[in-house]
Amino acid sequence: MQICTDYQDKVLYLRLSGEMDEHNAAAARLYADRLAEGYAQSEKAVIDLKDVSFMDSTGIGFLIGRYKKFRRYGIPVYVTNPSPGADKVLRMSGVYTLMPRI
């Protein structure tokens, strides 16, 4: 999994691509947590999942963990552009109740 970032108008954008599975998650977790700390002044964080080709329970754990990390800084988190497979997993798991889809 790769993460590309952009910061505009106090909004931190994280664009995820690749597979969100156990093999790829550890480095992405560390990187995303550093982003939360480095952009603590953000008004919101938007996680773009358009280029996620696969997501399992590790992907859900990744998202919920980053939700908790950003919330410690008072930053609401949103999900956008989920691939059809990711959208199905997120709907079934209830992740959208924490991180609304925009």
Image (cartoon, helix red, strand yellow):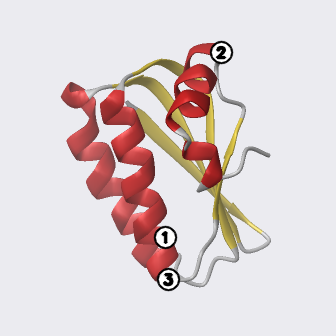
Label 3: which secondary element = loop
Please state which amino acid type lies under the numbered disc 1.
Phe
**Looking at the image, which is closer to me, 31 or 61?**
61
Please state which amino acid type lies under the numbered disc 3.
Tyr
Left or right position of 52 against 54: right
* Mark 3 residue crowding within 10 angstroms, few (<14) / some (14–19) / many (20+): some
Image coordinates for residue 31, horizontal then vertical, percent? 33, 55
**Looking at the image, which is closer to me, 41 or 65?**
65
Which quadrant of the structure image shows residue 60?
A: top left
Q: Are marks 3 and 1 in contact (CB under 8 Å)?
A: yes
Left or right position of 89 against 78: left
C-alpha separation, residue under disc 1 versus residue under disc 2: 25 Å
Label 1: which secondary element = helix
Image coordinates for residue 21, horizontal then vertical, percent? 30, 26
Q: Which residue is mark 1?
A: 70
Above or below residue 3? Residue 54 is above
Label 3 or label 2, whichever comes before in sequence order: 3
Image coordinates for residue 82, horizontal then vertical, percent? 65, 28
Which quadrant of the structure image shows residue 30?
A: bottom left
Image coordinates for residue 32, horizontal then vertical, percent? 40, 56
Q: Which residue is mark 3?
A: 73
